[in-house]
Amino acid sequence: MLHQIEQWIDQTNFEYQNQRVSCSKFSDEFKGFYPLEFLKQAYFVIVDTIPKPDFPELRQMNNMATQDFWLNNKQ
């Protein structure tokens, strides 16, 4: 499962590589928190819809976590 998620991350990064913007543009805002060299290696992309992996196993885990939450937090 972890390998499948890593592949999805790599594919998503590849698909958006032409739209990415360096986080170094926020160097003043992050001064003293993140080193500039780190920000130069980090990127962000503005999208209309956040990409999500379509893995049934993740949906099932989310459903179980939601069910557990509601069962454990009944008033």
Image: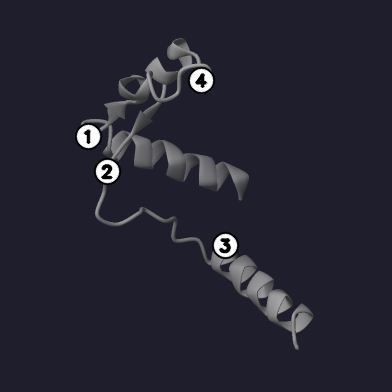
Foreground of the two, 33 or 65: 33
Dot 3 amino acid type: Leu
In the rendered structure, find residue 19 and report the number of the disc placed on it.
1
Q: CA distance from mark 2 to mark 4?
A: 21 Å
Q: Where 29 sits versus 71, above or below?
A: above
Q: Which residue is mark 4?
A: 34
Dot 1 amino acid type: Gln
Q: CA distance from mark 3 to mark 1?
A: 27 Å
In the rendered structure, find residue 46 and report the number of the disc placed on it.
2
Could you classify mark 4 by the number of other residues whose Cα lies within 10 Å: few (under 14), some (14-19), or many (20 or more)?
Answer: some
x then y, percent, for residue 2:
61, 45
Dot 4 amino acid type: Tyr
Q: CA distance from mark 2 to mark 1?
A: 8 Å
Q: Earlier in the sequence, mark 2 or mark 4?
A: 4
Q: Is residue 62 left or right of residue 22?
A: right
Q: Quadrant of the C terminus?
A: bottom right
Q: Earlier in the sequence, mark 3 or mark 2?
A: 2
Dot 2 amino acid type: Ile
Could you classify mark 2 by the number of other residues whose Cα lies within 10 Å: few (under 14), some (14-19), or many (20 or more)?
Answer: few
x then y, percent, for residue 68:
73, 76
Kind of element beneath mark 4: loop
Tag in front: 2 or 1: 2
Do callouts 2 and 1 mark residues in contact (Cβ within 8 Å)?
Answer: yes
Do callouts 2 and 4 mark residues in contact (Cβ within 8 Å)?
Answer: no
Kind of element beneath mark 1: loop
Q: CA distance from mark 4 to mark 1?
A: 23 Å
Q: Where 54 sits versus 25, above or below?
A: below
Kind of element beneath mark 2: loop
Q: CA distance from mark 3 to mark 4?
A: 31 Å
Q: Which residue is mark 3?
A: 58
